[in-house]
Amino acid sequence: MVAETSELIEFRRAFVWLLCGMLLPSVALVAFGVVAVANERAAVERRLAEEYDARLHSVAQDLGLRLDRAADAVAAGRADPLIALVQPLEAPPLELAEAARRAATLPIGGHVFATVEIGNERRAYALVRSVASGNELTVLSQYDLQAVADQVAHLAELRFPRERAAFRLAPPREPVAALAALRRIVAEAGQTSTVVARMPLGPPLEGFALTAELPGDPAAPLAFRNRTLYIALLVLLYVGIGAGFGLTLREMRRAYKLSRLKTDFVANISHELRTPLTSVRLFAETLREGRAEGPEEVHECVTLLSAEADRLSRMVEKLLDWSRLESGREQLELERTDVPVLLDRIGEAYKAQQLPASYQTEIEAQLPAVEVDRDAMAQVVLNLLTNAVKYTGEDKRIRVRARRSGRNVAIEVEDNGPGVRPHDRKRIFDRFYRGDDLLSRGTEGTGLGLAIAKKIVELHGGRIELDSRLGEGSIFRVILPAV
Ligand code: ADP
């Protein structure tokens, strides 16, 4: 009892450790997963922005070079499609005064960029140092913003021919009024592309930005895919943890049950051994003290003494058998055997047991032979027969039947005993398990007979089955492969 309680405590402690060890990290993991799922869209947008920033950078560089080239064309007196207007800068307006000063310091052919905001309109200029009729002067050339915008698309096409995104020159953001914001939201709802990256430009396009736009909402499917993946992984993780938990729990429960069975077994076996030992001592004492009266009583005492000694040795034999089987030391000597020969061997072993009942044998004609270790198989059937005798009442009707069962041979032991209760039917084949109804409690036993039988049959590649009806009897069936 004490051992049982301490084992239970051990079991519970192990379980609590298991819970802590698995639950805490898994809760943390789930929290992490939930945050990841929630942030997925932002993460995808960030990734896209990073990816397109690099491309925008290249396009901006190309655009800068192209604007320089246009200014150089003006310096050389050539026309350039990006330049809308060229005029000498004589009296620079206030906004251009600083740029004009800087341009004046440049050598011929040099230029300075400037952006000017006039009214609501932004203009882009290049102030180019040039020579006209022998005089050095600064020429004000105004960029055609529409042509520059077209140029952006063209440059991007040249650099990234297979790119899905559209690169655009975005005008300066207008100041956002309350109503304008609303209007923009409405407009965005129906919009068919999304700006994934934006890069502000320097002079002469100050205030303008280069943007990369992808059709539709590119983050949505990606975010959805990743989110689904996360959720699937989480579910998988939990299913795994759940399965692991279940399996561990089952194993622990098994180990716990087995240890309880063992404790029971030790108690049982001590009890079982004590009974015949007490009798042996009692009869021996009776004989020693000369308390037996007459030769008849002496004879009776000796007979009982020998029966009790037999009982003891049977129990010890069973224990030894089991330990041999458990340790894998049992070596089977398989021989091709005809079923009647096997049944004869069983009959001899049965007779030696001197059990208080006999049994009938039925053998189907022309049974195929089986490959068995005769002694081991005789022991299997003997165990079944001993049980049949042990667990039936006064009127014992026991039958051993050998018949064909598909491609196999079945040897059945049938009795008219009390039958086995449904919830015991699987468990009686477990080691140390004894049915706890009164009948098995009142009989000698170790709970090993059927476990030994099952193990031996399985070593032969066969199986053992039970058909049982409560109150009517049981049929234990050994099924062996035929040769
Ligand atoms: P033991 O007979 O030593 O208890 P066994 O392993 O041979 O151990 O049997 C296990 C249990 O199966 C028995 O305790 C009993 O409850 C049940 N049992 C075995 N054979 C029969 C039978 N022929 N009829 C009813 N119950 C049986």
Image (cartoon, rainbow, N blue to C red):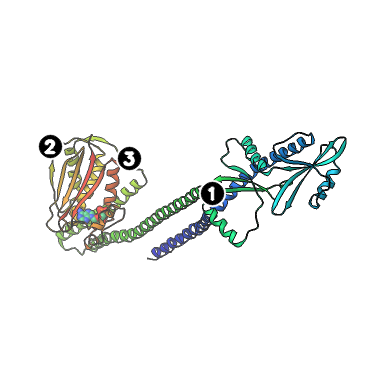
Residue 346 in the image: state x and y as whole percent.
Answer: 19, 44
Q: Residue at x 88, y 35 (%)?
A: 134
Q: CA distance from mark 3 to mark 1?
A: 69 Å
Assess whether mark 2 and mark 3 are in contact (beta carbons under 8 angstroms): no
**Does residue 119 appear anywhere in the picture?**
yes
Q: Amino acid at mark 1?
A: Ala
Q: Which residue is mark 3?
A: 331
Q: Quadrant of ligand 1?
A: bottom left
Residue 412 falls left or right of residue 152:
left
Residue 122 in the image: state x and y as whole percent.
Answer: 70, 50
Residue 255 in the image: state x and y as whole percent.
Answer: 39, 56
Question: Dot 2: what SS?
Answer: loop
Q: Residue at x 69, y 40 (%)?
A: 63
Q: Which residue is mark 2?
A: 365
Q: Residue at x 18, y 38 (%)?
A: 339
User: Can you tell which of label 2 and label 1 is closer to the viewer?
Assistant: 1
User: Can you tell which of label 3 and label 1 is closer to the viewer?
Assistant: 1
Between 316 and 446, which is closer to the camera in this rendering? 446
Question: Dot 3: what SS?
Answer: loop
Question: Dot 1: what SS?
Answer: helix
Q: Earlier in the sequence, mark 2 or mark 1?
A: 1
Q: Quadrant of residue 282?
A: bottom left
**Does residue 36 appear anywhere in the picture?**
no
Q: Amino acid at mark 2?
A: Ala
Q: Earlier in the sequence, mark 3 or mark 1?
A: 1
Q: Is mark 1 within 8 Å of ligand 1?
A: no
Q: Which residue is mark 1?
A: 219
Q: Residue at x 69, y 37 (%)?
A: 81
Assess whether mark 1 and mark 2 are in contact (beta carbons under 8 angstroms): no
Q: Amino acid at mark 3?
A: Gln
Residue 358 falls left or right of residue 478:
left
User: Can you tell which of label 3 and label 2 is closer to the viewer?
Assistant: 2
